[in-house]
Image (cartoon, grey):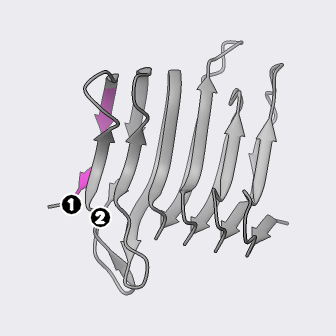
Amino acid sequence: GNIVGAGHSGATALLISEIGSWTSPVNGLEAHSNAQDGVFIFYFRGPIGNVKAWRNTNAGLYLTSVTPVTAITPTVDTAEVFGNVYNIAVNSTHAMLLRNIVANGDTSFSSTHGLFLYAATTNFGIILENCDFSTVSGIKTANTNDITWGDSNTFAQIITKDCKFGAG
């Protein structure tokens, strides 16, 4: 089954903090309509999949302090995020794979950022594979920006493979 967090008026719905290393997949995280982040993962190390996060007033999926501690690259495989101010927010990343991500605004809650890299941080080794940003369909609209840097002090290395970008 899924792990669901919904409708929190002043908090993040799902907060995961892992200082060690985890190698077993965490699947089925779902968060919507929260006053902060939907899913917040601090010390992101292991694989997660099948994430759904929509209409959160900050990030749908927030990943911070991402550093591989084993031979396994931290991976998000299959996520649908829409209608969050930051669909996916990343802070201090050192090697990460985002695969099969769909990121949009929606007709009621616009999304400013598909992928947001926080200011004054270093984010390198980010791989986007088979991702779809801003394809308009049904209630889903384009993000204002598909990929955004926080400010001029942000460094990023991003590799894209078979991705679609549609923000104007």
Question: Looking at the rendered structure, which numbered label has been put on residue 166?
Answer: 1
Q: Which residue is drawn at 37% across and 54% down?
A: 114
Q: What element carries label 2?
A: loop
Q: What residue type is labelled 2?
A: Ser
Which numbered disc, 1 or 2, marks the residue that appears first in the sequence? 2
Question: Where on the picture, by quarter, is residue 137?
Answer: bottom left
Does the CB distance between marks 1 and 2 fall below 8 Å?
A: yes
Q: How many labels does the image show?
A: 2
Most extreme residue toward the top is 70
Q: Looking at the picture, how far across and down is residue 3, in whole percent?
A: 82, 62
* Magenta segment boundaries in residue numbering: 158-165
Asked whether residue 163 is in view, the answer is no
Nearer to me, 81 or 35:
35
Residue at the front extreme, as displayed: 10
Q: In this view, does 152 lie above or below 149?
A: above
Q: Which mark is residue 134?
A: 2
